[in-house]
Amino acid sequence: MDIKSYIEDIAKRAKSAYSKSVSLSGSIKNRALYKIAELLDKNRDVIKKENLIDMDNGKKRGLSNAMLDRLLLNDKRIDGMIESLKSVISLPDPVGEVYDEKRLNNGLLIGKQRVPLGVIGMIYESRPNVTIEASSLTIKSSNAIILRGGSEAINSNKILGNIIREALDKSNIDPDMVNIIETTDREAVLHLIRMVGSVDVIIPRGGEELINFVSQNSLIPIIKHDKGVCSLFINYDADKNMAEQIAVNAKVQRPGVCNAIENLYIHKDYPYKKDLIEVLMKHNVKIKGYKEAADIVGEIERFEDLNEFTVEYLDLILSVKIVDSVDEAIYMINTYGSGHSDAIVSNNYKDMMKFKDGVLSAAVYLNASTRFTDGFEFGMGGEIGISTNKLHARGPVALRELTTYKYVIIGNGQIRE
C-alpha cells in the first residue's frame, strides 16, 4: 500500500464531505445520530465479537489490566455509547448561532456566527468508544473527521466505523464525514498530521509518547489531549469522611482513565493521614511515599525524586507527599502536574479560593472528585478529548469547542470615510 496516497485520498474525500455538511440542518444530523444508535443496538453481537479479537490480541501483547479495561466493549459500554448519542441529539446545534452582536454608531450591525472547524484529524489510543463519541460530536457540529485509532483496537474501530458510515449513508449524508484509517502502520499518522490544506486541526488523545510525536511533527494546529497527571490535596482541616471518599473515588473507581488522580498531597497537620492511606491500601492501591510520607504506615515504597510526580500510572498506584501549606500544594501541582484536573478537600474558604485561583489546570475542584472531568458528566453529551491547551479550548472538547466563528456585518449602504 502507498500509505501517503491512501491518506491523501481519505483527506480529499473528507474535505468534500465537509463542504456539503455545512448546509445540513440539525434535524437531518439528529436523524443520522439516531440511526447510529439503532445500528449499534442491532449489531451488538458482531461488535463484541470483533472487540474480543482485540482483547485476545491485547492479552497476548501483555497489555495492562487498565489498558484492557479501556479496550473492552461489553453490553454496558455499548449502552453507554447509545446513551452518549442520545445526549448529543438532545443538545442544541451550535452551527449558525449568532452571538456578541453590537450596533456601531454608523449603523453597522456586527455579530459572530459559529461555524465548524472543518476537517479534523484525530489520533487516539485504546478506547474504541471514542470512535462513537468523536463521530457523534463532529457530525452534530458539521465537521468531517478522520479517525486513526490504536493498533490494539483496530478491529473494534473498523466495525464501529462501518456502522457509522452505514448510518450516514442511510440518512442521505455523505459517509465520508467519518473516515477510519484502517492501516496500523505508524507512517499513516505522519502523513495525516502533514495534510496542510486538507486537514484543519489535529486532536491527539493518548499517551505521552503519542502527544510528543504529534506536537513535534504536525504542520497543522493541534488541540492536545495531554496526559492526565491529576492531583488531590487534603488540607489540614478536611472532613475525614469526605477526604477518604473523594480520594478513593478519584483513584480507584476507574484508575486507567485520564481524570483519575496520580498524586496525593496531604497537609502536614491533617490528623488522619494514617487512616487515609490505610483506606486506599484496602482498595489495593499501591502507595509510593516521598521521603517522610513513606513513614505514615509500614510497607510503603519510598522515593526521593520529585519527577515521580510527573508520572501518569493509569493503574492502582499513587504517589504521596506531605506538604507544609496550600501554597506548596499549588506549587507541586503547577510544577509537576499536566494541567488537567486537580482538587482540594478543605473547609477553609480562604485556602479554597487560593487553590482555585492558584492552580493553573483546565479543571479545578473544590470538595469533589476529579472523576467528573468528562464531557458527558459536564452535560456536553460526551467529548472528543480533554484539552490541556490554553488556546481555543480547555477541558472537555465538545460541540461548541468544535466550532470557531466568523464575523457577520450587516449594513444599509455604509462606506468608510
Image (cartoon, rainbow, N blue to C red):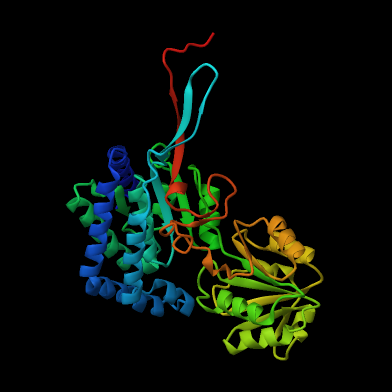
Nearest to the observer: residue 159 or residue 383: 383
Residue 176 visible within the image: no
User: Residue 131 appears in which quarter of the rendering?
Assistant: bottom left
Q: Is residue 333 above or below residue 66?
A: above
Residue 90 visible within the image: yes
Q: Is residue 27 above or below residue 276?
A: above
User: Where residue 18 sits in the image (x, y, percent)?
Assistant: 32, 41
User: Residue 286 appears in which quarter of the rendering?
Assistant: bottom right
Nearest to the observer: residue 120 or residue 384: 384
Nearest to the observer: residue 84 or residue 221: 84
User: Where residue 317 sits in the image (x, y, percent)?
Assistant: 60, 79
Q: Residue furthest top?
A: 417
User: Residue 98 appears in which quarter of the rendering?
Assistant: top left
Q: Is residue 408 left or right of residue 244?
A: left
Q: Is residue 270 left or right of residue 99?
A: right
Q: Is residue 1 above or below residue 285?
A: above
Nearest to the observer: residue 46 or residue 99: 99
Q: Residue at x 36, y 50 (%)?
A: 138
Please tell me how many numbered marks the rendered image carries.
Answer: 0
User: Where residue 258 sits in the image (x, y, percent)?
Assistant: 53, 66
Q: Residue at x 22, y 56 (%)?
A: 167
Q: Is residue 72 left or right of residue 215?
A: left
User: Where, quadrant-wise, is the C terminus in this rendering?
Assistant: top right
Q: Is residue 44 above or below residue 335?
A: below
